[in-house]
Image (tube, grey):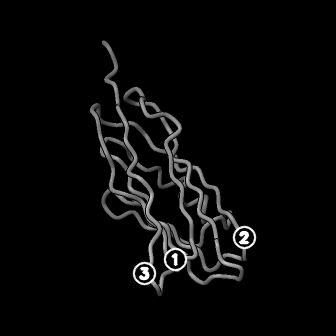
Amino acid sequence: KECQVALQVKLTNQTVKEGAVTEAQVVCQNTAKETIPTPVAIIGIPGGLEVRHDQLKELVKSKKIAAYEVLGREVVLYWREMQAGDKAELPLSLNAAIPGEYTGPASRAYLYYTDEYKNWADPLKVVIEPVQQ
């Protein structure tokens, strides 16, 4: 409860064809009764899926997030603040690039300056089926 940020992440499709696009539905919510500063969400992306940087840039441009980073298999989303009860609902577009079964790192959310309190979400799992030729 000290975390003050709730996080939910799930894939639209857990089985996709190679070359297809799926989405990770991200919901980050302020659970405090006041405005919270600098919430951060780190979304673990399963191997075989590639993040679309152009879509992340659009999220910044539309002010749905303040900034982002892609660090290996993780997408880090930043907000400057969240008002009491605010909920950010974001789709992250992912391209299915390499066939196989993959599990990503666990996703988590926290306040930037109190990272000792985290809210964890289960790792995403995906099966990418090869295109039959």
Reading the chain from its start, which is encountered first: label 3 or label 1? 1
Label 3 SS: strand
Spot occupied by residue 41 in the image (x, y as percentages of width and height): 49, 67
Identity, as a three-letter code, of the amino acid under mark 2: Gly
Left or right for 101, reference 19: left
Q: Quickly name the residue at label 3.
A: 115
- Look at the numbered discs 2 and 3 and tell me whether their residues touch, using CB distance below 8 Å: no
Spot occupied by residue 56 in the image (x, y as percentages of width and height): 53, 58
Q: Quickly name the residue at label 2.
A: 85
**Real-space Cα distance between discs 3 and 1?**
8 Å
Residue at 33% across, 56% down: 105
Identity, as a three-letter code, of the amino acid under mark 3: Asp
- Look at the numbered discs 3 and 1 and tell me whether their residues touch, using CB distance below 8 Å: no
Mark 3, Cα crowd under 10 Å, few <14 / some 14-19 / many 20+, is few
**Real-space Cα distance between discs 2 and 3?**
20 Å
Q: Nearer the viewer, residue 30 or 73?
A: 30
Q: Quickly name the residue at label 1.
A: 3
Spot occupied by residue 52 in the image (x, y as percentages of width and height): 47, 50
Reading the chain from its start, which is encountered first: label 2 or label 3? 2
Q: Nearer the viewer, residue 68 or 26?
A: 26
Mark 1, Cα crowd under 10 Å, few <14 / some 14-19 / many 20+, is some
Residue at 63% across, 82% down: 36
Reading the chain from its start, which is encountered first: label 2 or label 1? 1
* Picture quadrant where residue 108 is located: bottom left
**Real-space Cα distance between discs 2 and 1?**
14 Å
Label 1 SS: loop
Left or right for 63, reference 16: right
